Image (cartoon, rainbow, N blue to C red):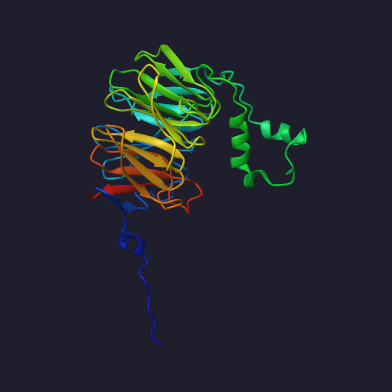
Amino acid sequence: MKVIHGRKDRDKFTKSVFSAGDFTFSLDPDYGNFPEGFDHVMFPSGCCDSEGNLYLTTRNLEWPIAALDRDGNYVKGIGKGLLTETHGICITPQDTILCADTGCHVVRELTKDGELISELGNFNKPSDSGFDANAWRKLQRQGYLVPTDIPFKDNAAWMFYEGARSIRRAAPPFNRPTGVCVAPNGCIYVSDGYGNASVHRFSADGKLIRTWGGPGDEPGKFIVPHCVWADKFSRIWVGDREGNKVNVFDEEGELIACVTEGLYQPTEIFADDEYVYVAERGGGLTIFDMNMDIAGQIGFYNSPIRAHGMCGDGKGNLFLMPLTTYDGHYLMKLTRER
């Protein structure tokens, strides 16, 4: 009998390539070198600094933000005791970290060593958007929904959606904020999406300038504004995950473009000097040029590049943070080949 052994490290030598038009990326499904015993939980989002270091939000209360160097080696965890349910994250022009905390309704600014600098919002005080996380239960008890014996874990998405449908107005900051970015002029923009349906603009020193949006599925409105990014022209791109569209505004909140077809739930947005990249939870990546035209779309429905979070290193390479349901892959890298 001939005994044949396959390679135990086969995953490292299998090349997966995604290509469309002028774009070709190779996929590393398990990027990063983490210490033995590292508690892998979901990485909701990430960002890169000017040196290529990667900062990942985590669902680990011990270290809510994980830092990796430019080669993908784990360096440290930061934010202990300062963050409860991390979501979107970005690096500021001052080389500090802004992180949206959906759990305590704030955006906090930290140093790269994890020291608290400032805070936007009212800690543990959600604004009044009409949001009711238990709307589904009330509908059940009123007799509008039939299933009363299906376990919660099997209906989390449905229950979440019913909560989103309960939002009645674009409220002030914040009710479970989801994303944060800094525009070229220093203004801070926050997508307020898990318990609100709005975008907020703050001055560089943290003063609220404007709130816009509101619940709805028409252009300029939101169901779940999940992410926000300011491109080099200070256009504000907002991904509406459950609305399955991308709204683009000027810095005053006036709608200038809306993408409503051919997306698979936009969850995160990143832009460099040439392109705007939109990660899609349903398995795709849509790339826009600076004319706001689609330059390429890669992936397919439920493809392996299903991402909740995404960021780039400014060199055309992208980092994807998959869903927790995606088979134990926690951090991926799309390397630009052409």
- Relative horizontal placement of residue 8, taking residue 133 as reference (left or right): left
Instruction: Please say if 137 is above or below 122.
Output: below
**Front-lying residue, 99 or 254:** 254
Q: Residue at x 39, y 41 (%)?
A: 279
Q: Residue at x 62, y 27 (%)?
A: 166
- Rendered image quadrant of residue 127: top right
In percent of width and height, residue 259 lies at 41, 34
In percent of width and height, residue 30 lies at 37, 52
- Relative horizontal placement of residue 217, taking residue 273 as reference (left or right): right
Q: Residue at x 51, y 21 (%)?
A: 174
Is residue 157 something one can see in this rendering? Answer: yes
- Quadrant (top left/top right/bottom left/bottom right) for the N terminus: bottom left
Count all numbered tags in the image, as a single digit.
0
**Front-lying residue, 139 or 52:** 139
Instruction: Please say if 242 is above or below 121.
Output: below
- Rendered image quadrant of residue 180: top left
Q: Residue at x 50, y 18 (%)?
A: 173
Instruction: Please say if 118 is above or below 68.
Output: above
In percent of width and height, residue 79 lies at 43, 30
In percent of width and height, residue 17 lies at 31, 56
- Rendered image quadrant of residue 51: top left
Is residue 45 something one can see in this rendering? Answer: no
Q: Residue furthest bottom?
A: 1
